[in-house]
Image (cartoon, rainbow, N blue to C red):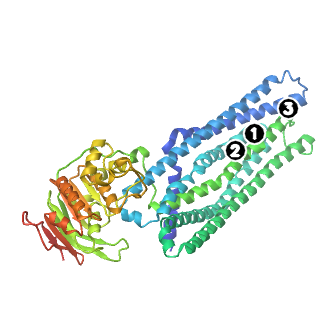
Amino acid sequence: MQQTDSTQVDAIRDQGRWMMRLWRHARAPVVVAITLPLISGLLLVAQAYLLASVLHRAIVEGASPHTLLTPVLCIAGLLAVRIGLAIVAERCGILAAERIKFFLRSASHATLLDHRPDWTAARSSGALSSAIIDQIESLDGFLVRFLPAMAQAAILPLAFAVMVLPVDWVVGLLFLVTAPMIPLFMALVGWGAEAASQAQAAAFTRLSGLFADRLRAIVTLKLFGRAESETRSVMAASEGLRLRTLAVLKIAFLSSAVLEFFAALGVAGVALYVGLTLLGFVDLRLSVLTLQAGLFCLLMAPEVYQPLRLLAAHYHDRAAAKAAVAELARQFDGLPESAGPQAILKPTSDTHSAAPIAVDMERVSLHTPDSRRLVIDSTSLLVPAGRHVALVGESGIGKSTLLEAVARMRAFEGTIRLDGQDTADVAEPELRTRVAFLGQRPRLFHGTIAENIKLGCRSAGDAEVHEAARRAAVLPFATQLPDGLDTLIGEGGIGLSGGEAHRVALARIFLRDPGLVLLDEPTAHLDAETESQVLDALMAFAAGRTMIVATHSAAVADRMDSVYRIVGAKVLSGPHVRAARPAVALRSVA
């Protein structure tokens, strides 16, 4: 138990250090946003001194308005400069926050792309979306307001107290004694605020995940009569979030009120001392306290506490940011560390290699995502370069799982090599360039059919897209649509049948130049005539390439060089192997 607590404490410390390193991703605007308020604070001292001097000369010395014109204009000029500095500092803070949030969203998105589909499937899509959008947005207050306020609170009160000491040592000493009390109380209140913010962030993530998942399954819930029940669960989660949000606000308002109270006591103490001294009831000075000195101390009193009050007001931004960072670390199994978005958004390699790839699987074992069932049991299979292999078997037996493992899209035990190189050692851009994969449920996005096909190669021209559509038998149904290949389809392929959507995804492969082609039920939902057309084009494309196909279709299996059947978690020789070529080597390990 103690070890667990120590691990949690270390994780919290690491997250805090990570938050403080975020400024490195926007160095220039962060430095400006922090430095300008400090300069403004120094100008404030000059402004207060000039104002106290003007009042002293007007009240005590009876100076004429004409003689006071120059210092008054100086005061107005200092005020205008401070306003300008505040505007520039705030704009730089916003710019820095936007840059850092862009980096974090890019890094989080890259993490989603880098992980295998089984990692994403094990997490709520709503929770991941909430982490990328809402939790990262929660860092805005920390970056824009808290970091500059922390710098001001650390430097300005001490600087103000030191500048007041030569004018009146009692007031300066009072500032030095009372100012540190505010951060102390702020830290005590901050512990409760941080805990409440973490609970609120977790509740927000749960609600986002619950709402997104229920929205995706709304048709199924309606069909099974569960819509009302799930509506009540969403309402209950919303109520829980409301209560936790109010708890955070309650602590924030309470902490602000307490800290305002202590700051007011400090200002009142200075005012009482100055007033009693001017009236002659208190005499702690070696010289007479002038009106100018007294007014300067009074004017500086609220300004000494202002940076601390500002820090207290934005302290809940830090608590909310820490809760958001903890949620990010939990959702993504860690926090991104990179030089910036440029290191994440690297273009894919333009190097293409159509040379066939040999696939060597050695003692490969695969389990279901929940690890409860063994799908493939310690099987070794060698597919020489340029061979075409079919995997057949009952539905759910593991054909798709094995293809995903070869494509490095699923965790497995054992070793899979491509041309003698372990797949774990192949760079992601190189792997995706050399290996083409088509799953059973290809992803189509909202856009035209041509745009969806062009996803296979962004640089492809209209003629190449048209040829790929022809080879994948997309043209027969696309030409019947009002706009042909420029017809818009909905997210997920809405507007197309299952077979049509599959052919659009297959056309993407014809735009590429892979050495290994992995296909999962490429002719599903097709009639015999269309299947034959697609197979003709597919076999022509696969000539000189390695191809592994998972299929239930006898017509597809008959076109392959070798057929293997998955039975009882083992890959076994199929019922028939084409005599034109020798059988693919199979090493089955008990």
The C terminus, quarter of image: bottom left
Q: Amino acid at mark 3?
A: Leu
Compare residues 299 and 341 and report the one nearer the observer. Answer: 341
Residue carrying label 2: 157
> Residue 228: percent from the left, percent from the top?
57, 73
- Nearer to me, 200 or 392: 392
Name the residue at 64% across, 68% down: 239
Q: Is residue 82 above or below residue 249?
A: above
The x, y position of residue 45, in whole percent, is 73, 35
Q: Nearer the viewer, mark 3 or mark 2?
A: 3
Residue carrying label 1? 164
- Work out how far the residue at label 2 is from the one at label 1, CA to CA, in angstroms: 11 Å
Residue 589 visible at all: yes
Residue at figure coordinates x 75%, y 26% from the top left: 74
What amino acid is at disc 1? Val
State how far apart marks 1 and 3 are (Cα): 18 Å
The location of residue 159, given as percent across then percent down, is 68, 41
